[in-house]
Image (spheres, helix red, strand yellow):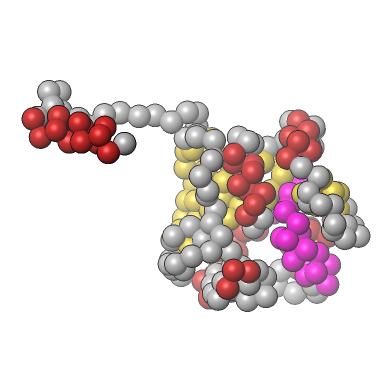
Amino acid sequence: MRKILVGAMVSMDGVMQAPGGPAEDPTKGFKFGGWQMPYLDQEFGEAIERIFKQKINLLLGRKTYEIFAAYWPYYDESGEDGGIAKRFNEINKYVVSRSGEVDTSWTGSVLLRDIADVKRLKQEDGPNLVTQGSTELVHALLAHDLVDAMSIFTVPVVLGGGKKLFADGSAPHAFKLTSSRISSTGVLIGHYERDGGIKIDDAALGSPSRREIARQARMKREG
């Protein structure tokens, strides 16, 4: 059985849209494409490299797959990110597209039509599956309780709007922080694994005050 790891570059307000450049995803008038790039440094690169050095396959939504397929096969493997380019070109890439209208000619690409196909793939033996970007797919994975781990790179910017990592409807789960570091540019790099159900407690007084009783009664009236 494979595990699914969500990899995400997010702003402090949770936006993950178009971190790499203005042309990645300008939909809905998003005007800050490329917001991640000024924060790249050695720590950032090392953390990314550790993720992709593992025995993995990629699991991508259609839009992110098309970005990757138009970039990595044409990247000079002798360049700074040549190791990642070589890795991406060698491994399997699973692209989820409901319409099926996607060019899968990039070597090692496999089309999946829906989340049921992802579930079946997860049950098979093989390398773990890593997402990048792919907002709609990540929302579906979280809603169907398919995410085993997350690597989140939080960049110290507030973008004010855009496609976000988390949406209402995610399956409730606790996660534990397994490792973290802060880059020289202030990026908080956190790696998380599932840690069971949500734990709750109550900070209420043992005997509620009259004001608290009144507050609760008002909340019930207001719905």
**Left or right for 109, reference 157:** right
For the magenta stretch, what is the residue range?
52-74
Q: Percent position (x, y) of residue 79?
A: 75, 74
The one of 90 and 216 positioned closer to us in this rendering? 216
Quarter of the image where the C terminus is located: top left
In the rendered image, which quarter is residue 124 located in? top right
Q: Residue at x 81, y 45 (%)?
A: 113
Taking the image as drawn, is residue 43 in sight? no
In the rendered image, which quarter is residue 202 located in? top left
**Left or right for 164, reference 80:** left
Q: Residue at x 54, y 74 (%)?
A: 32
Q: Percent position (x, y) of residue 212?
A: 14, 33
- In the image, farthest residue toward the left: 210
The one of 86 and 161 positioned closer to us in this rendering? 161
Q: Percent position (x, y) of residue 60?
A: 73, 53
Q: Residue at x 54, y 35 (%)?
A: 171
Q: How many marks?
A: 0
The one of 128 and 163 positioned closer to us in this rendering? 163
Quarter of the image where the N terminus is located: top right
**Left or right for 75, reference 10:** right
In the rendered image, which quarter is residue 28 located in? bottom right
Vertical relation: 159 (above or below) 50? below
The one of 149 and 52 positioned closer to us in this rendering? 149
